[in-house]
Image (cartoon, grey):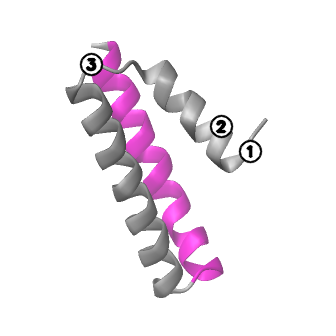
Amino acid sequence: MRLATGSALGQAVYLLFTPLLSRLYSPEDFGVVAVFFALILVAFAAAAAVGASIAFGFYVWVSVFGLV
């Protein structure tokens, strides 16, 4: 039940902010972000398929993009 609630809440937030984001960014920008997140999701799915933990994916994410 918690997973469904969190997913529904995430979708609601996305729907609420879509009008604001569509005024700020062009369709090309949305495309770039969509491709970026698609690549990230594929990378995490591949890592999960070979048994890597999410912690490893987060470590790679932080080290590659220098978020810390």
Q: Give amino acid for label 1.
A: Gly
Residue 10 position (above or below residue 18)? above
State which quarter of the image contains the C terminus. Answer: top right
- Which percent across, then down, holds residue 2? 34, 14
- Which percent across, then down, holds residue 51? 27, 19
Q: Who is closer to the viewer here, 32 or 42?
A: 42
Name the residue at 46% across, 53% down.
14
Part of the protein shown in magenta: 2-25
Residue 2 position (above or below residue 6)? above
Question: In the rendered view, does 11 fall on the left or right side of 29?
Answer: left
* Residues at discs 1 and 3 in contact (Cβ within 8 Å): no
Within 10 Å of the Cα at label 3, are there few (<14), some (14-19), or many (20+) other Cα atoms?
few
Please give the residue where the numbered disc 2 appears in the rendered image: 62
Please give the residue where the numbered disc 1 appears in the rendered image: 66
Name the residue at 67% across, 49% down.
65
Please give the residue where the numbered disc 3 appears in the rendered image: 51
What is the magenta segment's predominant secondary structure? helix
Label 3 vs label 2: CA separation? 20 Å
